[in-house]
Image (cartoon, rainbow, N blue to C red):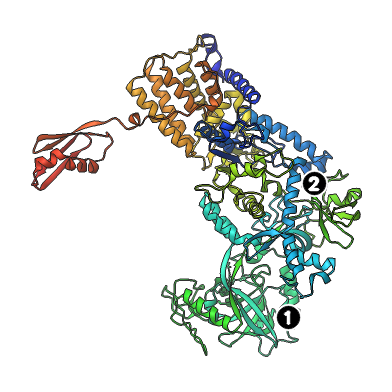
C-alpha cells in the first residue's frame, strides 16, 4: 500500500491511486444510479419506454441469484457476477438491449435457525443481510437494472409463486396431447362421459370426496401419503435431491429415514421425456446435461410376469429381457406386498441351510429381515461393494420361458421405489446378482456368450459378464429360441413373444420420482390451499393472494431425536390457530364456510423456479409477466428453439436441483399458455471456484490465513510453524478475503480485473492477494498513457498514429473483442495489457483516436476508470453506451516478409508471406507460384530446400 500511493503523491498528485480510485468509483456509481444508466427498456414501454433501445436485439444475461447470508460476500462470490457484468457491458457496446439485474433468493434455513436461536423475525435478519449484500455488490460497479431487482420473500413476488402453484395444482398432464391442460377440461371429460371414471359410475353420482380423489390422481400438484425422506434432526421432510449419497440430509448431515407421511408432490415425472429431449436444444455444458439425463434415468426394458402360487404373478422390470433364460432366481424388495401372500407355513423339503438365515419358518425369516432392511437408506442398500444379504421366502415362481421353478428371495438390494420392486436375477450377467448367487450358492447359467475368452461356465468366473455387444446362447425353449441373436434382436424377439402371450410387454422406466414439495418449516411460501370439513383441498382464489405468512410465537419446527424415525412432523404455522382456522368465501358458489389452512410451507427451491420471468416485468400486478414482454426477452428464435435466457452463469452444484425444477415449471407455464419459452435458460455456463490457501497449526486447527507470514518458503502464525493447504474460501477455513478489503486497498476496478485475469472462467483458481497489485499497475499505466500525473490534464495529440501502433491497436481490438464475446476474459486482459505495454514503450503522447479506443476496450472490464477517462477526453455522454471499437482487418493480419524463391540458384519469384508461415505451407505456395511454374517448364522436381520464411530453393530433376 505504502509503495503505491504515499510519497509519490506529492510529485504526482494526479496519479491513479487507491484514494483516487475510491473517489472515481463512488462518483460514477452515484451518477449511474441517478441517471438509470443500466435500465433496460421493455418493448412496450411499460418500464421506461426507450423505443429505439427496445428495437435493438436483446440479451438477457443472468446470474444464479444469491442467498443473502449473514456472513456477507467473500471474493469468491462475485466471480460470476463480475463475469456476467463484463459480458453484459460488452453486449451493450455491440448494439444490444441488455437486461442484467440481480435479486435475492431469500427464504432459507439459516435465517430461520437464527430466528429460533434469537427470536428475531427471519424477515428482519434477512432484509438486513440483503441491505448489507447490496452495499457490497454496489461497490463492485455492477451494471444492474435496479428497478428489476426483488427478493423471493417480497409478498409481491411470492404472490406469483403461489399463483404458479395454483396453476400447477389446477392442471393435469394429457399424455395423448403431450402437454399440461387445465383440470376443468378433465372434469368436463368426466362429466360428458368422454372419459370414464375408474369404476365406470357416472361423474354426477360420485361424492365430493370420490371426485377429489380421482382428480388428485391427475393433478400436477397433489397431496399423497407416501414414504418420504424424514429427517427428525431437522424436523422436516426432504426431496430426494436433498439427501446425500450416504442417506443423510445435505443440510446438517442428519440421518434420513423413510416414513409414510401426507405431503405435497409435484408430478415432474409426467415431463420426464420432454425434460430429456429438450436438453438437445439448449447450450449447456455436457457434464450438466449428463447429470440431468442420469437423474431422469430413462431405461428401456420390459415387464415380465413370473407365475407364483395358484393365481398370482410376480411382475419384474428388466432392461435385459434377452437374458430371460438365465434367470435362475428372483428377488422381491422386502417391502413388496406379495411377500406375505407367497410365504408358506414351512420351509419346503430340502431347503438349503444358507437360504433360511437359520430361522425356523419362512415367516420368521422374512419378518426379521424386513426389520433389518427398514433401518437402512436406499443408498446404503444399493452400495456396490457391500456383501449381499437376503433370505428365501420359501416360495418358488416359474420362469415363463424355460418353465423352470426358481426360488424367490427378498433382499435389500432390490428397492421398492424403482421399477416394480421385483427382479428376475440373472447372476451370470449382472454383478449384483452374481455376488448374491455366490453368497447363497444359487445356480448360474451363461446366456450371453463372453467375448473375452473366459468360457461359458460361470462357476469359473470371478464376476458377471455384462455386454450389449455379444451373442445369445443357451436360450432355446419349446417354442422360442434366441440362440445366435445379438442382444438388440433378442430383446425385440422375446418382448414380442411375451406380449403375444399376455405375460409381458416392452416398457420404459425412469429413475426420476415426483418432487416432494412440502416442508415443515416457517420461513417459506405458505400454500394457497385450504381444506374443508371433509378434508378436501381447495385452491384460494387469485384475489386472496398473496397469502402472507402469519406471525408465530415460535419459529422452530419440532426437532426430534435425530435417530428416532417414528416421530411425526409438527409445523410452526399449525401453532397459529387463528390463522389456520378461517371462514372464507372462495367464490365457488358454496358461500362462506369454515376451512383449515395448509400449514406446510413450500421448499426453498420454489422461489428460484421462475425468477427469470419476474425480472422481465417486476411490477406487473395483473399478470406474472406481460406476454409481449416475455416473448421479446425469452421467446424462441434462430438457434434457440425453446427460447430462454441468453446466458446464465452459476455454480455446477445446481445441476439437478434448481435447474431441473426450473425447467419443469417453465414447461408447465408454457403448456398453459402463460409464456412462450419452454426452457428457462438457453445457455448455461458454470464458473470455477475461487480457492484459497488455508493454514493449520500443530493441533490441526485452522488459523487466520491473513495473519500467516511466509519466511523462506515456510509459514508461521504468531511465530509457530503452520501447515499450508488449498481449500474452498470461507469462514470455516478462516481464509475468507472480502471484496471490500480489496476494493479499499486498490479499488473495485482492480478487483474486477484481477478476478477476470486469474484464469479461464470455468476453472477453479487459487486466490493470491499479493498478485492483485499486478492489475492495479496495469490500470495505473493506462491512466498514465492518457493523463499527465502532475497536471491532471489529458496528454493526447490530434496527430495520426504510426503504423506499428495501428497494428497493435487493431490486433488488441480484434482479439479482446472476440475473447469478451466468448467469455475468455483472461486472454482479453492479456491482449489489452500487450497493447498498453506497446503504447507505454512508444513514449510521447498518444493520438486521441488510440487513447479513446484504449479506453473503450477497458470499459467492460474496468468501467469506473474508463468512464473517468472518457469524460476527461471531452465526451459528455457515458462510456457505457458507446460502440465497442471495430478492428480494421488491414491492420489485423500479421506484417508480411518477402520470401525469395530460387531455381538452381537463380531468383525466379518473390512471395509476400506471414513471418510465422511453416515450411510445408511455404513450399506449396512457392511451387504454385505462376512464375515458378513457368520457369520449371514441366520439369520434375528433385529436391526442395525450404528455410521459412525467407528462402525456398528448388532443384529440378
Ligand atoms: C435382469 C438383468 C440381467 C438385469 C442383466 C440387468 C442385467 P436400470 O438400467 O438402472 O434401469 N432392477 C430392476 N428393478 C430393480 C429394483 N427395484 N431394485 C434394484 N434393481 C432393480 O436397471 C435396470 C435393471 O436393474 C433391471 O434389469 C434389473 O436387473 C434391475 F444381465 O434384470 B435387470
* 628 on left or right of 819: right
Q: Closest to the observer: 781 or 153?
A: 153
Depicted 357 relative to depicted 686: above or below: below
Q: How many marks?
A: 2
Pointers 2 and 1 in contact (CB under 8 A)? Answer: no
Question: Would residue 568 be visible to someone looking at this image?
Answer: no
Q: Which element type, helix, strand or loop, lies under badge 1?
A: loop
Question: Would residue 791 be visible to someone looking at this image?
Answer: yes
Depicted 788 relative to depicted 381: above or below: above
Give percent across and percent down for residue 353: 66, 83
* Residue at 55%, 55% in the rendered image: 279
Mark 2 = which residue? 545
Which badge, 2 or 1, is on the more N-terminal residue? Answer: 1
Disc 2 residue: CB within 8 Å of ligand 1 = no
* 310 on left or right of 207: left
* Residue at 75%, 44% in the rendered image: 158
Quadrant holding the N terminus: top right
Task: Mark 2 vs mark 1: give the one in front.
Answer: 2
Q: Residues within 10 Å of mark 1 (few under 14, many from 20)?
A: some
Q: Give the label on residue 432, or none.
A: none
Q: Which element type, helix, strand or loop, lies under badge 2?
A: loop
Single out the residue that lies furthest toward the front: 192
Q: Closest to the observer: 52 or 602?
A: 52
Q: Residues within 10 Å of mark 2 (few under 14, many from 20)?
A: some
Q: Give the label on residue 359, or none.
A: 1
What is the C-alpha distance between the residues marked 2 and 1? 60 Å
Amino acid at each position: 500500500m505504502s509503495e503505491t500511493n504515499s510519497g509519490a503523491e506529492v510529485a504526482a498528485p494526479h496519479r491513479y491511486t487507491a484514494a483516487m480510485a475510491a473517489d472515481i468509483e463512488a462518483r460514477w456509481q452515484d451518477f449511474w444510479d441517478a441517471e438509470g444508466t443500466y435500465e433496460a427498456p421493455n418493448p412496450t414501454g411499460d418500464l421506461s419506454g426507450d423505443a429505439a433501445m427496445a428495437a435493438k436485439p436483446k440479451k438477457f444475461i443472468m446470474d444464479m441469484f444469491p442467498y443473502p447470508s449473514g456472513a456477507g460476500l467473500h471474493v469468491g462470490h462475485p466471480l460470476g457476477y463480475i463475469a456476467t457484468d463484463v459480458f453484459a457491458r460488452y453486449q451493450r457496446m455491440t448494439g444490444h438491449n441488455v437486461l442484467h439485474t440481480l435479486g435475492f433468493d431469500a427464504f432459507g434455513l439459516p435465517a430461520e435457525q437464527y430466528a429460533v436461536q434469537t427470536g428475531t423475525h427471519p424477515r428482519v435478519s434477512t432484509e438486513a443481510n440483503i441491505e448489507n449484500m447490496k452495499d457490497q455488490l454496489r461497490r463492485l460497479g455492477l451494471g444492474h437494472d435496479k428497478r428489476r431487482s426483488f427478493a423471493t420473500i417480497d409478498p409481491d413476488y411470492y404472490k406469483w409463486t403461489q399463483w404458479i402453484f395454483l396453476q400447477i395444482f389446477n392442471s393435469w398432464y394429457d399424455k395423448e396431447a403431450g402437454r399440461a391442460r387445465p383440470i376443468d377440461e378433465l372434469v368436463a371429460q368426466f362429466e360428458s362421459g368422454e372419459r370414464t371414471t375408474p369404476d365406470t359410475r357416472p361423474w354426477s353420482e360420485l361424492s365430493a370426496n370420490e371426485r377429489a380423489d380421482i382428480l388428485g390422481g391427475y393433478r400436477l400438484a397433489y397431496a399423497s401419503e407416501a414414504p418420504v425422506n424424514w429427517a427428525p434432526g431437522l424436523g422436516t421432510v426432504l426431496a430426494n435431491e436433498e439427501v446425500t449419497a450416504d442417506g443423510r440430509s445435505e443440510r446438517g448431515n442428519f440421518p434420513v429415514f423413510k416414513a409414510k407421511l401426507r405431503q405435497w408432490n409435484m408430478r415432474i415425472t409426467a415431463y420426464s421425456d420432454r425434460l430429456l429431449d429438450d436438453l438437445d436444444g439448449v447450450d449447456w455444458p455436457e457434464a450438466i446435461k449428463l447429470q440431468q439425463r442420469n437423474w431422469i434415468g430413462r431405461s428401456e426394458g420390459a415387464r415380465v410376469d413370473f407365475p407364483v402360487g395358484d393365481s398370482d404373478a410376480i411382475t419384474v422390470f428388466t432392461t435385459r429381457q434377452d437374458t430371460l433364460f438365465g434367470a435362475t432366481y428372483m428377488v422381491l424388495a422386502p417391502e413388496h406386498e406379495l411377500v406375505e401372500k407367497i410365504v408358506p407355513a414351512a420351509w419346503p423339503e430340502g431347503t438349503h441351510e444358507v437360504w433360511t438365515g437359520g430361522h425356523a419358518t419362512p415367516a420368521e425369516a422374512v419378518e426379521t429381515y424386513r426389520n433389518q432392511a427398514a433401518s437402512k437408506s436406499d443408498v446404503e442398500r444399493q452400495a456396490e461393494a457391500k456383501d449381499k444379504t437376503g433370505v428365501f421366502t420359501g416360495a418358488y415362481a416359474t420362469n415363463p420361458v424355460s418353465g423352470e421353478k426358481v426360488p424367490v428371495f427378498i433382499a435389500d438390494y432390490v428397492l421398492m421405489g424403482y421399477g416394480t420392486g421385483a427382479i428376475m436375477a440373472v447372476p451370470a450377467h449382472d454383478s449384483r446378482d452374481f455376488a448374491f448367487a455366490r453368497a447363497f450358492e444359487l445356480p448360474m447359467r451363461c446366456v450371453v456368450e463372453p467375448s473375452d475368452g473366459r468360457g461359458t461356465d460361470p462357476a469359473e468366473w470371478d464376476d458377471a459378464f455384462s455386454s450389449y455387444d455379444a451373442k445369445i446362447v443357451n436360450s432355446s425353449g419349446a417354442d422360442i429360441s434366441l440362440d445366435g441373436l445379438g442382444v438388440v434382436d433378442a430383446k425385440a424377439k422375446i418382448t414380442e413373444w411375451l406380449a403375444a402371450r399376455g405375460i409381458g410387454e416392452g416398457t420404459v422406466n425412469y429413475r426420476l420420482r415426483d418432487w416432494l414439495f412440502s416442508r415443515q418449516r416457517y420461513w417459506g411460501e405458505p400454500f394457497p390451499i385450504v381444506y374443508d370439513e371433509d378434508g378436501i383441498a381447495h385452491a384460494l382464489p387469485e384475489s386472496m393472494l398473496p397469502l402472507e405468512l402469519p406471525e408465530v410465537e415460535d419459529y422452530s419446527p419440532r426437532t426430534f431425536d435425530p435417530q428416532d424415525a417414528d416421530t411425526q412432523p409438527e409445523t410452526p404455522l399449525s401453532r397459529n390457530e387463528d390463522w389456520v382456522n378461517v371462514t372464507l368465501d372462495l367464490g365457488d358458489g358454496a358461500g362462506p364456510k369454515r376451512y383449515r389452512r395448509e400449514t406446510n410451507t413450500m421448499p426453498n427451491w420454489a422461489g428460484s423456479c421462475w425468477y427469470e420471468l419476474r425480472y422481465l416485468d417486476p411490477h406487473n400486478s395483473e399478470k406474472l409477466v406481460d406476454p409481449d414482454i416475455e416473448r421479446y426477452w425469452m421467446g424462441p428464435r434462430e438457434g434457440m428453439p425453446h427460447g430462454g435466457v441468453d446466458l446464465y452463469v452459476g455454480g455446477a452444484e445446481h445441476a439437478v436441483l434448481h435447474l431441473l425444477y426450473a425447467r419443469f415449471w417453465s414447461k408447465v407455464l408454457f403448456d398453459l399458455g402463460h409464456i412462450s419459452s419452454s426452457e428457462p435458460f438457453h445457455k448455461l455456463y458454470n464458473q470455477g471456484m475461487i480457492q484459497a490457501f488455508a493454514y493449520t497449526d500443530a493441533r490441526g486447527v485452522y488459523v487466520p490465513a491473513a495473519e500467516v507470514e511466509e519466511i523462506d518458503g515456510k509459514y508461521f502464525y504468531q511465530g509457530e510453524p503452520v501447515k499450508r493447504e488449498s481449500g474452498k474460501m470461507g469462514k470455516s477455513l478462516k481464509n475468507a478475503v472480502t471484496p471490500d478489503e480489496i476494493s479499499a486497498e486498490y479499488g473495485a476496478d482492480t478487483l474486477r480485473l484481477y478476478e477476470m485475469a486469474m484464469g479461464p472462467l470455468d476453472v477453479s483458481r487459487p486466490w493470491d492477494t499479493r498478485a492483485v497489485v499486478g492489475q492495479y499497475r496495469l490500470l495505473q499505466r493506462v491512466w498514465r498513457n492518457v493523463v499527465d500525473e502532475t497536471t491532471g490534464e489529458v496528454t493526447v495529440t490530434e496527430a495520426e498514429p504510426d503504423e506499428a501502433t495501428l497494428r497493435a491497436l487493431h490486433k488488441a481490438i480484434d482479439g479482446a473483442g472476440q475473447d469478451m464475446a466468448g467469455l475468455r476474459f483472461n486472454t482479453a486482459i492479456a491482449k489489452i495489457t500487450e497493447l498498453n505495454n506497446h503504447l507505454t514503450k512508444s513514449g510521447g503522447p498518444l493520438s486521441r483516436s488510440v487513447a479513446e479506443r484504449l479506453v473503450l476496450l477497458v470499459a467492460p472490464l474496468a468501467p469506473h476508470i474508463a468512464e473517468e477517462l472518457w469524460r476527461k477526453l471531452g465526451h459528455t455522454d457515458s462510456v457505457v453506451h458507446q460502440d465497442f471499437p471495430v478492428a480494421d482487418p488491414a491492420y489485423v493480419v500479421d506484417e508480411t516478409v518477402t520470401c525469395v524463391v530460387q531455381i538452381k540458384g537463380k531468383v525466379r519469384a518473390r512471395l509476400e508471406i506471414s513471418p510465422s508461415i511453416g515450411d510445408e505451407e511455404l513450399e506449396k505456395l512457392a511451387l504454385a507460384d505462376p512464375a515458378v511454374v513457368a520457369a520449371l517448364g514441366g520439369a520434375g522436381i528433385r529436391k526442395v530446400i525450404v528455410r521459412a520464411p525467407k528462402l525456398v530453393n528448388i532443384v529440378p530433376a
